[in-house]
Image (cartoon, rainbow, N blue to C red):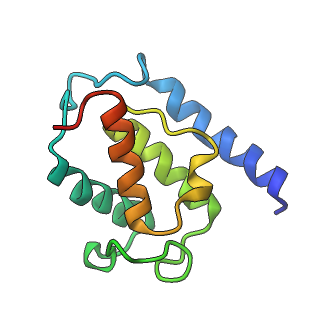
Amino acid sequence: MNRRAFVLYALWIAGPVRAQRANPGKPGPDRPTSYRENEVGPKVRGIIAEQLEIEEDRVQDSASFEKDLGANELVLDELATADDVEFAIEIGDAEPEKLLKVIDAIDCVKRHLRTAKRLD
């Protein structure tokens, strides 16, 4: 699959998920309005393990998505969408390409939560 086809496919998949949220960027009644700094890492690692269908103990901060966890670009986009939904944040379409390691994903979520003033 070439890059253009991949992006179109990823947008096609992510579109309905993002559209399901009535008010993107704001937590729903079942989500916390803020997170503690130490809560974000375990939650992101749990989402990664669930999306990749692997044991959570394999998801270490230093793990490479591609080399260590076997994730491709499509999976990274799905992870970004899952983080969008779980944390009620907007991760830009270009950001998943920059996520090389698990710690990058954790830092990305924390950065968006800080911007939204929802990280304690």
Where residue 26 appears, x then y in whole percent? 34, 21
Q: Is residue 112 above or below residue 4?
A: above
For the C terminus, the image quarter is top left
Residue in view at x 52 percent, y 60 percent: 99
Left or right of residue 100: residue 114: left
Where residue 3 appears, x then y in whole percent? 81, 57
Left or right of residue 37: residue 53: right
Q: Residue furthest bottom?
A: 68
Q: Is residue 22 above or below residue 48?
A: above
Q: Within the image, what quadrant is residue 66 found in?
A: bottom right
Left or right of residue 24: residue 58: left
The total of numbered circles placed on residues is: 0
Where residue 50 appears, x then y in whole percent? 35, 62
Where residue 74 appears, x then y in whole percent? 62, 58
For the N terminus, the image quarter is bottom right
Q: Residue furthest top?
A: 23
The one of 95 and 47 positioned closer to us in this rendering? 95
Residue in view at x 40 percent, y 33 percent: 89
Residue in view at x 14 percent, y 43 percent: 36
Q: Is residue 69 above or below residue 10?
A: below
The one of 13 and 59 positioned closer to us in this rendering? 59
Q: Within the image, what quadrant is residue 21 found in?
A: top left
Left or right of residue 79: residue 92: right
Residue in view at x 40 percent, y 24 percent: 25
